[in-house]
Amino acid sequence: MVWELSGCSGGYDPNSDCVGTATYKDFPAAREAFLRQRGYID
């Protein structure tokens, strides 16, 4: 099974629209990116 998870990686503009998206191959990759963006891991 292939999951294609996406998330907003470029921040948001003044209208709260996503500026850039990233696609992750699986949940662990998406979770790692989330934790890195928020400073929980280096």
Image (spheres, rainbow, N blue to C red):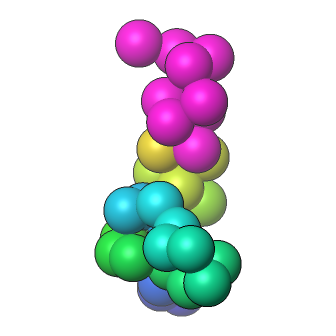
Bounds of the magenta segment: 34-42
Q: From this viewpoint, is residue 23 visible? A: no
Above or below — where is 35 with respect to 23? above
Above or below — where is 32 with respect to 18? above
Residue 39 spot, x, y in % from top left? 56, 19
The reply to whether the magenta stretch includes residue 24 is no
Give the left or right position of residue 11, taking residue 27 as reference.
left
Give the left or right position of residue 34, taking residue 20 as reference.
right
Residue 28 spot, x, y in % from top left? 56, 49
Residue 41 spot, x, y in % from top left? 52, 15
The reply to whether the magenta stretch includes residue 38 is yes
Q: Please give the name of the residue rendered at 35% of the width and 75% of the height, measured from the top-left corner.
A: 20
State the count of labels.
Answer: 0
Residue 37 spot, x, y in % from top left? 50, 36
Quadrant where the N terminus is found in the figure: bottom right
Q: Please give the name of the residue rendered at 47% of the width and 44% of the height, measured from the top-left corner.
A: 33
Q: Please give the name of the residue rendered at 49% of the width and 73% of the height, measured from the top-left corner.
A: 13
